[in-house]
């Protein structure tokens, strides 16, 4: 089944400003994919954490690129891409670096505008070196690759009675 996602705007929305997000997206058809938060750290890292796995770049731009690459890989594993993201929550340890994040965000998303919320936090739980974490929701056309299609019932339960 093909997905159907439509942007929703207020009747009086301003057309003279460019916003890096959509106020709302209406998902009419498709499968929802919920992504855990990703940072610049490897998605698969040791628990309890090992310090050597968190030798991260110091700038927001570099960390944002690594986080977006992790987001992209996770989406691709489910048969999706960046254009399939409908909502994202972005956590920053310094909101003053939001413009750096927004530039990287725009590079990866092009003209696609999911809904977003950006929050400044005192620290990210993953590691003190992490500056940004992004969680997202995407819409896929159907089940993830490799998932067999569901068989449709012919109207009879296993016991032979009609449903």
Image: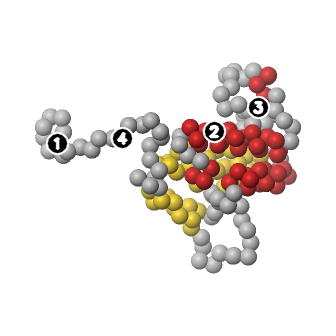
Say which label, 4 or 1, has the lower sequence index. Answer: 4
Query: Residue 84 at what x, y percent from top left?
Result: 57, 52
Say which label, 4 or 3, has the lower sequence index. Answer: 3
Q: Distance from label 3 to label 1 (Cα)?
A: 54 Å
Q: Secondary structure at mark 4?
A: loop
Left or right for 119, reference 3: right
Q: Secondary structure at mark 2?
A: helix
- Up-down: is 75 above or below 49? below
- Crowding around mark 1 (Cα neighbors within 10 Å: few <14, some 14 to 19, many 20+) is few
- The quarter of the displayed image where residue 114 is located: bottom right
- The quarter of the displayed image where residue 162 is located: top left
* Along the line of sight, the residue nearer the viewer: 76 or 60: 76
Q: Distance from label 4 to label 3 (Cα)?
A: 40 Å
Q: Which residue is mark 1?
A: 156
CB-based contact (under 8 Å), mark 4 and mark 3: no
Q: Which residue is mark 2?
A: 73
Query: Residue 23 at what x, y percent from top left?
Result: 63, 64
Q: Which residue is mark 4?
A: 149
| Foreground: disc 4 or disc 1 | 4
| Foreground: disc 3 or disc 1 | 1
Say which label, 3 or 1, has the lower sequence index. Answer: 3
* Along the line of sight, the residue nearer the viewer: 90 or 77: 77
Q: Residue at x 58, y 62 (%)?
A: 24
Q: Distance from label 4 to label 1 (Cα)?
A: 19 Å
* Along the line of sight, the residue nearer the viewer: 63 or 77: 77
Q: Which residue is mark 3?
A: 127
Q: Secondary structure at mark 1?
A: loop
């Amino acid at each position: 089944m093909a997905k159907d996602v439509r942007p929703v705007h207020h009747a009086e929305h301003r057309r003279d400003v460019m916003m890096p997000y959509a106020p709302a997206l209406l998902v009419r058809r498709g499968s929802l994919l919920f992504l855990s938060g990703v940072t610049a750290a490897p998605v698969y890292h040791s628990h309890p954490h090992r310090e050597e796995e968190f030798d991260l770049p110091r700038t927001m731009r570099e960390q944002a690129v690594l986080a977006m690459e992790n987001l992209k890989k996770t989406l691709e594993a489910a048969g999706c891409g960046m254009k399939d993201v409908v909502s994202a929550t972005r956590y920053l340890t310094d909101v003053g670096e939001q413009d750096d994040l927004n530039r990287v965000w725009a590079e990866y998303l092009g003209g696609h505008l999911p809904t977003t919320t950006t929050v400044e936090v005192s620290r990210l739980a993953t590691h003190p070196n992490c500056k940004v974490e992004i969680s997202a929701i995407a819409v896929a056309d159907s089940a993830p690759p490799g998932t067999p299609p569901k068989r449709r019932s012919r109207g009879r339960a296993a016991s032979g009675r009609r449903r």
